[in-house]
Amino acid sequence: MESCPDDALYMAPFKEVAEKHSPHWDYAIQLPERDEIGEKYSVKGSQFLKPLFEFSGACAGCGETPYLKLATQLFGDRMVIANASGCSSVWGGTSTTIPFTTNKEGHGPAWGRSLFEDNAEYGFGMMLATRQRRQKLLQDMTTLLVDVKLPDDVKSAFRDWIENYENPDKCQTAAIEIETALKRMGPDLDPRLSSILEQREMLRTQSHWMVGGDGWAYDIGYGGLDHVLARGENVNILVLDTEMYSNTGGQVSKATQLATVTKYATHGKRQVKKDLGLCAMQYENVYVASVALGANMNQCVQAFKEAEHYPGTSLLIAYSPCIDWGIEMKNMMSEQKEAVDSGYWTLYRFDPRRIEKGANPFQLDSKKIKYDLMQFLGGQNRFEQLRRADTETADKLQQVLLL
């Protein structure tokens, strides 16, 4: 191998690289986590939080992974993820490795994978099981406060937990109080108290997420997804929208945009993209947001916050540039900004809670268009390929996107 400058990218023996960079790594991982971060749900504050997501092995510049990183920073210590087959299940849980990690207390995302066709049902079942188990704990604690003579610290901890059953932060504090108080009572516990201690992972509120690509959400798994949207239960859905079946080589999906050249649409897709957000908003009780991290970081952080705090079903549709688009992936974040600035991708939030305040539930977060749409399309091979092959058809189809 020819010699390369230190800052160049090149293959080298592991031992050589490890000896050079290990001291830097050892120093970095020993840095303490900051507790005083200001507003957690802000762009600056969120980035002081430890990501519980690392070394995913995704393609360089992948547009999907930043959204999971952000989610784990905001509430990863209590996330339960049902991951659909696809790119996110490959970089999310490849054989023998997983990129999700834990915080200093040992808490981190719980991750499981299911198939395209039943991931929504899989995640929904997780939520129902968790709810049933937590409701049983709630019932047991309420009964024990009446029927059993308990130490004052146990009674106080039980009451705190019951009062803050659905409050993540206060419930976390109460859960620690319960564990400490019950362990202090010694090994000979009442069987009902022992059962509570054994199920202490259920004392903390869980944040249930169904994660997958557009192949799952728009196509193969849409039946199950629509069922979940219609139920109105407290679950969160994150769609990593690459506008094609990325993991299997870039095939057309219902999320593929008009005029896109991709596998099984080699002459340009002739139908407009399915509007998944509109389908969900028609239920009127689903929180829906369309986000693009590179275009508006603050809007994305706020959408994640609002979705997770919404006491019902939430749907986040995340614009996720893919290497199969024929773009330079080092410019992935800039591609997102140009997509929004040109009007190709719209940022919005639909929050049903605003109706109770007499406000419009729909908030358009995109600003005035300031970038030429045709120039944006020309920068991606998935659109430009059609223009090179058939300019007349490209003009006809791409003009529709201007409407």
Image: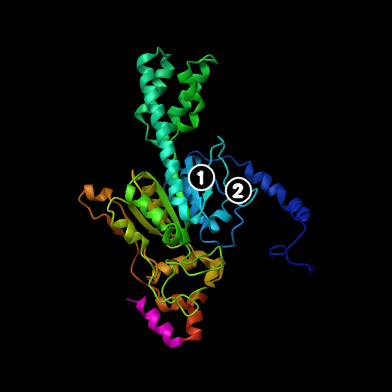
**Rendered residue at 38%/35% (across/down):** 167
Query: Residue 373 location, x and y as percent?
Result: 40, 76
Name the quarter where the N terminus is drawn: bottom right
Looking at the rendering, which quadrant does residue 27 occupy? top right
Query: Residue 379 location, x and y as percent?
Result: 49, 76
Against 111, residue 188 (above or below) is above
Q: Name the residue under label 1.
A: 49
Query: Residue 278 location, x and y as percent?
Result: 32, 61
Spatial CA span between label 2 and label 1: 20 Å
Against 105, residue 335 (above or below) is below
User: Which tag, 2 or 1, sits closer to the chain's start?
Assistant: 1
Question: How many labels sit on residues?
Answer: 2
**Rendered residue at 50%/85% (across/down):** 389
Highlighted magenta segment, given as a residue range = 391-403
**Rendered residue at 45%/28% (across/down):** 175
Q: Mark 2 points at which residue?
A: 98
- The amino acid at mark 1 is Leu
- The amino acid at mark 2 is Ile
- Tell me the chief SS of the magenta region: helix
Please say whether residue 395 is one of the residues in the magenta stretch.
yes
